[in-house]
Amino acid sequence: MNVQLWSRNVPLYETLAGSGRFNVSKFDGESVTGDTDVLVVDGKDVSYLDLKLVLQKRAEPIHCFYILTEAMLQQREEIEASLNLRLLPPFMTESQITDAIVLETHHDATAPDSKVHVFFGADSKVGTTMTVDSVGEYIARHSQARVLVVHLESPVQYMDDLLDGKGAGMDHLKFRLFNDILDSEEFKKAAYKGKYDNLFFVQGPSIISDLRYYQPRHVETIVRLAAADYDIILIDAGSNVERGLCIGALRSSPYRYAVTTQQAHVKDRFLRLADQIFLPMQIDRDTMQLIVNKHVPSNIRDKQIEEVYGAKILAEIPHLDFKGWQAEVETKTLLGQEPRYDAAVAAIAKTITERQEIPLEAESMGIRAKLGRWMR
């Protein structure tokens, strides 16, 4: 398949050519050659009005992809109405752009399998980090899988004692990440072992001002290196969806879990994210699953929550009052504090391990769990 690329992005040219699916050539901006099957245009270099003039010169329709810039998101509907083409959102890496083009132009192509499962908060303080850490601990305890938990928004303060002064985490990686020289050995040094031999963590950036410099491609690098050594990768993407790390995480896998609560302001923020971020960035809400954290009995039914959020509920994690604070003080997760909590975490873990085709050992029923069942 012949592709012409109208862009100064050399890595994109190399990635398209390296896919083995296309014969790639540079477009000179004059006229599309007759044997061209696909035209790929970068909005950073070409305005959509200039593209429109070029397409009007061609008598036959052509499969055209136009990569939007962040500033063009406000014009997205106008561009779609004036041009018959496929818009690609900003912040996609060269590999993601290539994969999107391959999937749309080749009927035999399928999306690659992913070991990555992304958790993000509908708002701050909804308990995303504790949920991810609990799920990671549960999977490691009940399987032979090597589990990596990556925190992208900030360090997990209640796990500082486990670091033992190693300084592990994103701060250790950033120099090599920013200069595209990070390798697997250096990445391994950034991960520290949890309470099980098959459970590892990477701490988030500790310097707030650094967050502006992280880009989606940095997450892609982390995922690529981690996939070689770990069976399951759980990403705590935080709640700042507009940041490069969070966007990169959401684009790194089709397995996305939105952690929310029953609070109205959390719901309102999620709907703003859906309208202002997810829709223009082509991140489908209906592929997400909801984890309703800090759940308390109410007259709001699950079906009503699912209709509002546009996503299915995977689990409801009960509210444990002040036990969460105590767990942080004791540098541990909430597993073992309440049978209902453990059951909700187990449901999430089961979904993840089934997707990865990893056996999950059945949990033996301890005395405390049995008492919990009898007293309900």
Image (spheres, helix red, strand yellow):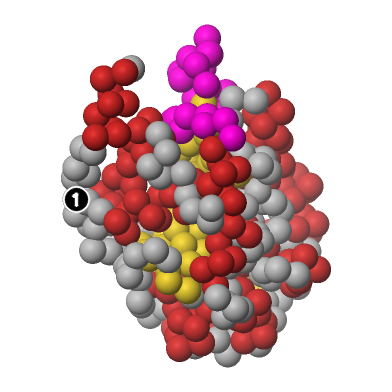
Amino acid type of disc 1?
Glu
Q: Compared with residue 128, is residue 37 higher up or lower down, i.e. above or below?
A: below
Nearest the viewer among 329 and 100 is 329
At a point 66% along the width and 42% down the height, the residue shown is: 125
Q: Is residue 283 left or right of residue 81?
A: left
Evaluate whether residue 28 shows in this view.
Answer: no
Choose top left, top right, bottom left or bottom right for residue 274. top right
User: Which residue is under mark 1?
Assistant: 361
- Give the SS element for disc 1: loop
**Does 150 lie within the magenta span?**
no
Q: Residues within 10 Å of mark 1 (few under 14, many from 20)?
A: few
Q: Compared with residue 163, is residue 323 higher up or lower down, i.e. above or below?
A: above
At a point 59% along the width and 25% down the height, the residue shown is: 262
The C terminus appears in which quarter of the rendering? top left
Evaluate whether residue 360 shows in this view.
Answer: yes
Image coords of residue 257 (percent x, y): 48, 44
Image coords of residue 175 (percent x, y): 67, 85
At a point 75% along the width and 58% down the height, the residue shown is: 70
Nearest the viewer among 303 and 23 is 303
Q: Magenta region: which residues?
A: 296-322
